[in-house]
Amino acid sequence: MALAPPPVSDISVLLDPGLDRGRRAAVLSVLSGVIWPLQAALVAWAIGGLLTGKEPSALLAAFGFGGLGLLRAGLGYFADADAQAAAEVDIAKLRAEIVATEAGRASDSTFGGAGSIAALASEKLELLGPYVSRYSPVRARVMVLPLVILVLAFWHSWAVGIVLLISGPLIPLFMALVGMAAKQASARQMAEIGTLNDFLVERLSALVDIRLLGAGPKVLEGFSKQAGDLRRRTVAVLGVAFLSSTVLELFAAIGIAMVAVYVGFSLLGELQFGAWGAPLTPEAGIFLLLLAPEFYQPLRDLSAAWHDKQAAMAVTDEFAAYSCEPHAKLPGAGATAVRLPGPASVALHGCCTPTGTQLPDIVIADGERVALVGRSGSGKTSALRLMAGLELPRHGSVIVADQPLTAENADSWRARLGWMPQAPHFLGGSLRQNLTLGRGGDVRAALETAAIAEVVEALPQQLRTRLGETGAGLSGGEARRLTLARAVHGRPDLLLADEPTADLDAETARMVTEGLLAQAALGATLVIATHDKALAARMDRVIDLGDAT
């Protein structure tokens, strides 16, 4: 049993693949912001000179301002490009992890259904993009630019510096308080998205049954209620974001207004303090007026991106819950392999399943027909999974084809098997692809063995028909017979069937039983796990697992 890594609580660790590009984007973004004080100095020099009669070179000021503007735009462009590239790399890596985990999973996920996992891999991971591309560069600018501007403000006027120093810290303090509520609201929204996706997948898979039972209005009512809950949670997240932005704008507007009032009255001669013992010059006053909005601009940007961080943290927590979920990893590479040579025999010796169930020793000879019986939870399905090489025992050994089953030969052993699970499950491709799984063989013979050929011919596109994951459009018995056809396709040497006749009517159960026995008559070893006494009685031998624990 393979255990997933411990939960990732540090978002920087989670986003490690794009870290270098993200850092470069942050540096370029900071350099782009530092250029503005130089541009402001040129503007103040030009306008101040005109006001004092010094007649500065307008051409020099214009070319200097324009050149710095182009440099600032170029740095901003490359910063945005690097940040976007870093976001794409991070999201692609995490999405690949989820796909690889699900492709190699040997048991159902406890994290959630297919809808929850699909939502995490698609729309939820996309919420990490704004964090990388917007929040991270903005955070870097907030750490540098306000300090640079604060030093320049104090250099020219201690009064302006004090105004900025007092009003500036109030903004991050308030944002930290708002952020706690924002993260909780984002987490509730993330959970609701997963629940709604699971609900939708389940209802779509049962769409035909819903229509036949006339339950459409009831299903729509439930879906409308859940959609309304998600809408309210989304509005709550947006409300928190708008609240933080509004308060920030209020503080910024007050701070800029106080700077403007001080500069204006100082230039009019009404205020004689705040400029280090000398009157405030027009150049210094204009320079301070141009710097004040830029002092608050990184904080404005941080407020706009603050909900991006909270959403990303909520996604990080959810991904951590998914990644730390213990799961049995499929032994081997899951690839097509040459069949393992030797007899189609299997034996379990002292095996304890990954879930902790201790199994008795089981030995099944080549060509034998065996039924595993016992109460629910006695380990019948677990024994089949060990025989199929879908899991390896916690301790003990599985002997197949007269040799120990390991991760190295699991693919070769599974190439000889036919597997009929208890719950029918289909891939997203055509019916032919679901039956053959990329292997050659006589599809028609497999359909005839499973007594499902006439049903397939009646489908709109026959073997080209696409089914849902649970076989939407087919009855439970028809879906079960299709899984039998898939299991017997390619003439497997060992056929494993888990509760093949469960929940079937007598006639369908008879057809499934005859199909299994027909494959055994061709020389295949047949092992079934069942509660069906009539089916068990037709086997060569019955192994009672009893109350195995």
Image: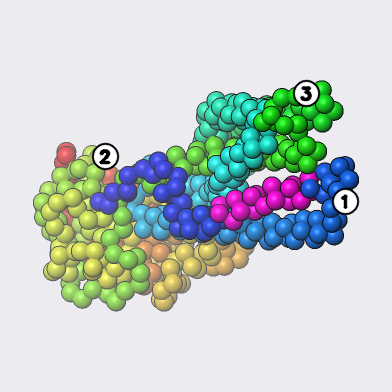
Q: Residue at x 17, y 72 (%)?
A: 343
- Does residue 245 appear in this view? no
Q: Label for residue 376? A: 2
- Left or right of 502, for residue 459: right
Circle 3 packing at 10 Å, graded few (<14), some (14-19), many (20+), is some
Q: Label for residue 55? A: 1
Residue type, numbered disc 2: Ser
Q: SS class of the residue under badge 3?
A: loop
Q: Which residue is mark 3?
A: 271
**Rendered location of residue 20, percent (x, y):** 48, 58
Q: Residue at x 82, y 26 (%)?
A: 269
Q: Nearer the viewer, residue 315 or 373?
A: 315
Q: Which residues lie in the magenta part? A: 26-44
**Rendered location of residue 271, percent (x, y):** 77, 23
Q: Quadrant of the C terminus?
A: top left
Decide: is 318 above or below 480: above
Residue type, numbered disc 1: Glu
**Rendered location of residue 388, percent (x, y):** 26, 60
Q: Quadrant of residue 367?
A: bottom left
Q: Estimate the spatial distance between the alpha carbons at disc 3 and disc 1, rounded to whole Å.
A: 27 Å
| Label 3 with label 2: CB-CB less than 8 Å | no
Decide: is 229 above or below 483: above
Residue type, numbered disc 3: Leu
Q: Is residue 201 magenta?
A: no
Q: Label for residue 129? A: none
Q: Nearer the viewer, mark 2 or mark 1?
A: 1
Q: Is residue 29 magenta?
A: yes
Earlier sequence position, callout 3 versus callout 1: 1
